[in-house]
Image (spheres, rainbow, N blue to C red):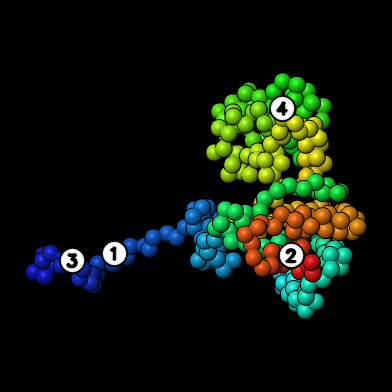
Amino acid sequence: MSKDKDKPKESGAAPAPAPVGEPAVPAAAPAASAPADAPVPAVAAEKSEKAEKGDSAEVPQQKKKPGVPPRRGKKLRNHLKNVAKKLHDAGPVSVKQAVAELKKLKRAKFDETVEIHINLGIDPTQSDQMVRGAIPLPHGIGKSVRVAVFCQGDNVAKAQAAGADVVGGADLVERVQKQNFLDFDVALASQDMMGMVSRLGKVLGPRGLMPTPKAGTVVPASGDLAAAVREFKAGKVEYRSDKTGQIHAGVGKMSFDETKLVENINAFVEQVRSVKPSGVKGNFINGVVLSATMSPGIRLAV
């Protein structure tokens, strides 16, 4: 044997050819590949499925922002654009024409509320120019009103007989104050109860439920409490100018006859015109707009 055979083989070097006359050592067989029908891991299967569908990159879903309506379709956008142009070109119209046009614009599936919006020529920063009151509309407002009455003594039976939903004295005051009970739309109070009801100003005031003499929700000792309850149950509307000098109120439903809506609107406008503050100079009513819950506004010539 030669001396080269006794030297150790360097790692990584190619194997030396076998000497003549000796059998060659077979090379190591390659690693066996996995059978075709072997189960594929779940992660790999999911990736391959996404690759087949073209979803190589996952797109995160955008969260809907509160208060942002969904995008309107092209057909609806064009329809509203044409309606707005038509109303703008027509200008202010009479109450009868506005009600007839409003009924043509109905597209909602529910019974919409007919609303009136009045722009007043007042200075909202002056307390003596605030406009506030209440009026019983000739045909009501088309919805049931929950009336709470703060009273005591004989007035309790009178209020219950007139149809009040909630009646009570000191117990009702405590219920509102401690349990935050506000399951009513209008709050009336007899004059002798205002000492206790005044403690609820922080609770009822921000919600527009605080009884006040200007709104007719405080019944004097000589007044008729039962008649006041019946008026508000029938649809007596409270109105109040906001910080921008405007009044917003509901005057009926789209299901009302045109004649009833016209009479309600005229009665409301005349009531607002009659309470013009003495400190207002110039035009008291700058403009009136009629609309429904889901319709554009129509300017009135009043």
Q: Find out whether the residues at labels 4 and 2 contact each other: C-beta distance under 8 Å.
A: no
Q: What is the C-alpha distance between the residues marked 3 and 1? A: 18 Å
Point out the tag, 1 or 2, that comes first from the N-terminus: 1
Residue 183 percent coordinates (x, y): 67, 35
Q: Nearer the viewer, residue 5 or 222?
A: 222
Q: Is residue 176 visible?
A: no
Q: What is the C-alpha distance between the residues marked 1 and 2? A: 105 Å
Q: What is the C-alpha distance between the residues marked 4 and 2? A: 38 Å
Amino acid type assigned to the residue bearing label 1 in the image: Val
Q: Nearer the viewer, residue 253 or 249?
A: 249
Looking at the rendered structure, the secondary structure element under dot 1 is loop
Amino acid type assigned to the residue bearing label 3 in the image: Ser
Residue 152 percent coordinates (x, y): 69, 23
Point out the tag, 4 or 2, that comes first from the N-terminus: 4
Point out the tag, 2 or 3, that comes first from the N-terminus: 3
Q: Nearer the viewer, residue 152 or 172?
A: 152
